[in-house]
Image (cartoon, rainbow, N blue to C red):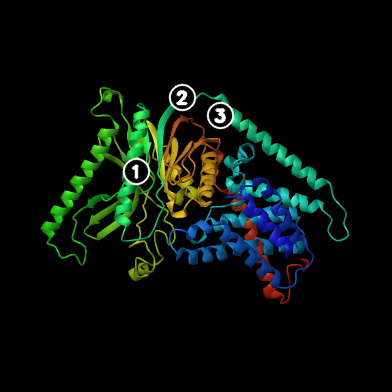
Amino acid sequence: MLLVVVANVLTWAAFPPLGLFPLAWFAPLAWARLIRLEQLAGRQPYWIVWGVSALAWAVLLEGVGRAYWANYFGLVLLGSYLAFYQVLTVALARVAVHRWKVSVILAAPVTWTGLELARGHLLTGFSMALLGHTQAKATSMIQIADLFGAYGVSFLVVFVGACLARSMPQSSRRWTAWPVFVAAATLACVFAYGRAKIGDLDGDEAPRTLKVALIQGTEDTIFDSATAQQRAIDSFNQYWRLTLDVCSRHDDLDLIVWPEGMFSGNLPQLTVNGIAIPPAGLDISPERFQELVAQRLKYFGEKTQGAASVVNGANDSDAAKRRTYLLVGCDTLELSSEGEKTFNAALLISPQGEVSSRYDKMHRVFLGEYVPLGDHLPWLYDFVPIGRGLTPGTQPASFDVKGINIAPSICFEITVPHLIRRQISELTQQAKRPDVLVNLTNDGWFWGTGILDLQLNCAVFRAIEMRRPTLIAANTGLTASIDSNGSIRATMPRRTEGSVVADVAIYRRPGHYERWGDWFAGLCLLCCLAVAVSSCRDRWLRPGITSETPHE
């Protein structure tokens, strides 16, 4: 069906790599016209919606498969799964329009938004590439995210498209003008709100600032066990060289940030919880094992102390003036009497070289960091190149850097709005309210593809939703500094080594989304569930009923 193809092509073109974001406003027009059609020929149109949408998702997320050939199988599954939500959107909206006589102006955006929220939670959730994310560069238009989240911007885009579709002739009807005026008035209100919020920030004076250097290297991820250790060492050396370079140019840095995993090199962090016992299969005495553990702990302590000493210019005459912290991504192995656990961690290294705080990644990536049931069926990990998988962290962290609280997140965690909101809420209750969000990510997995841009778009929305400056230190890019209005103040080109040095302005401006969360999208999802339950009940009680059958 032409409408399905047009809708998917316009949506794909609105996202990176093309980034033609105005096209996103017209994609829902095609979906709304499909929803308004009086009749669909059985199930075939829905299969077409699923097939074309699955292909569009696979093309958009193609970068997922770059690092390892087997990931392309996961890409096919992911695209097929995400396309299912498109089928549900059309099906539920058609029931609302044709059976319940709800205007497509409401039915289309409500079902779209509700199902976006559903896919953000089900099966660990996938909140990347929401339709509203296409508008990340339209700063004035997306300020409503502090009220409704990114889902609210998706609602707006579909609402406008549905208004345009409602104004167009359908069957014997003529053009209708009023939906266009409704769309125009809504856009005007949204734009006015956005300008007012931006003006509030521009008129404020930041009481505090934090000078941060975000380091970006260029090492793509390659799964090759023969070269893995050398590549890790090369990555560490590259980041160390870039760090020395930025320190030579800026002697007043408060914080230097390395991306996810880059501080590991050939010596990741080792911690001991209680009594460490030798892992099963390791032929070594407990005494000798304890000696090796103590040696590793000593070596890592020397590593952090040496890094802090050099960064803070121990041999320079100005050393007393410099108190620079390091925030680094590092693999962490924890030993205990129960065995060993591996964490994807962010470490805060003090100017004295001590690991003063640690955050363990809480939201793991499906098949990238864990396999379902892998804890009970370890042999499942033999089919994926991720070792034994990662253990999830259990709590958020707030890092104190010179009186400013920093909330770290790792990798795709920045794409999960309800996770970031929950972490901030928990930290606020502990009197550790974060002032800045910092994301450490290794996007070398995606080889410079549009996935990097999709993740950056997510960070833009987190900045607005939480009304906090957001920093990204990304291996291969896109490293960026984003203010609390979602404006990208500085960024590095993809696959380019260097650093972003940002003077981060700290404001105390809590957003409404931080307080209320996904209340709006939640209402939309409840409406979807009501329509779905009603439709299933009617089909059960009245066999042969269709979405076009009027409700009695």
The residue located at (27%, 38%) in the rendering is 307
Q: Nearer the viewer, residue 203 or 319?
A: 319
- Residue ranking furthest to the bottom: 543
Return the residue at label 2: 207
Q: Residue at x 22, y 42 (%)?
A: 301
Could you say which is closer to the camera, residue 122 or residue 326?
326
The CA span between labels 2 and 3 is 12 Å
Which quadrant of the figure contains the N terminus? bottom right
Q: Position of residue 242 (x, y in %)?
A: 36, 38
Which residue bears the numbered disc 1? 238
The residue indicated by pointer 3 is 201
Left or right: 348 as drawn, with respect to 289: right
Give the number of the mark in front: 1 or 2.
1
Residue 185, compared with residue 50, is above or below; it is above
Q: Residues within 10 Å of mark 2 (few under 14, many from 20)?
A: few
Q: Which mark is residue 536?
A: none
Can residue 93 be seen here? The reply is no
Label 1's element? Answer: helix
- Camera-near label (3 vs 1) is 1
Q: Quadrant of the C terminus?
A: bottom right
**Which quarter of the picture shows residue 35?**
bottom right
Q: Reply above or below: 9 against 178.
A: below
**Amino acid type for the residue under numbered disc 2:** Pro
Q: Tell me how far mark 3 sits from mark 1, CA to CA.
A: 37 Å
Residue 204 in the image, given as x and y percentages of width and height: 54, 25
Q: Secondary structure at mark 3?
A: helix
SS at mark 2? loop
Identify the mark nearer the N-term, 2 or 3: 3
Q: Nearer the viewer, residue 301 or 422?
A: 301
Amino acid at circle 1? Gln
